[in-house]
Amino acid sequence: MKVKVAVYPGTFDPITNGHLDILARAEKIFDRIIIGVAEQHNKDTLFDLEERVEMVCKVVSERPGVTVESFSGLLVNYVRKKKACTIVRGLRAVSDFEYEYQMYLTNKKLNENIETIFLMSSSEYAFISSSIIKQLVSLGGCVKGLVPPEVEMALFEKYRFPEMWGKF
């Protein structure tokens, strides 16, 4: 029997409960999921690549069939190298669709054998983005329930508010 492998790519700076919601639903479809943490040369990230990989590993460690790796370069080359058949992407709102559709068309042009599946965020996570999470914490806001506890602590430490972690 053929094992269905998917790659769930992103910068995960940081990983949120919205990302984990998409992952949980993708786990029902695929036998194996590789979370590909992108190096991202064109984006300023709060956490470096090693920190992001470590954070994602911590929050998915109890999930059989899910592995975490970093990658750089073209996503389709990484997907092909991993012998995956599908790219998993999450959509929060219509505003995400245009960008994601452009990426889908580009990836399809580069490798017509790789499919992309879009999973809609659950309504409780539709407003969450890594950018919003970072902005909230930078201003001393509460992110409890929006990110895993390990991520919440890492964010407060990064912004030098460790005394605030867990007080909300």
Image (cartoon, helix red, strand yellow):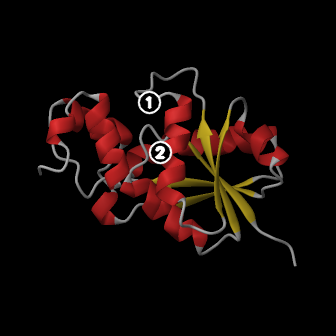
Where residue 97 appears, as percent x and y from the top left, is 48, 47
Amino acid type at circle 2 is: Met
Where residue 10 appears, as percent x and y from the top left, is 55, 42
Mark 2 touching mark 1, by CB under 8 A? yes
**Residue at 59% of width from left, 75% of height from top?**
28
Out of 10 and 96, give the one closest to the viewer: 10
> Farthest bottom residue?
1
Q: Is residue 11 visible to the viewer in this orientation of the structure?
A: no
Q: Secondary structure at mark 1?
A: loop
Where residue 115 appears, as percent x and y from the top left, is 73, 56
Amino acid type at circle 1 is: Phe
Name the residue tied to disc 1.
47
* Circle on res. 55: 2
**Residue 100 placement: quadrant:** top right
Tell me how far mark 2 sits from mark 1, CA to CA: 10 Å
- Classify mark 1: residues with Cα within 10 Å, few (<14), some (14-19) or many (20+): some
> Farthest front residue?
163
* Circle on res. 148: none
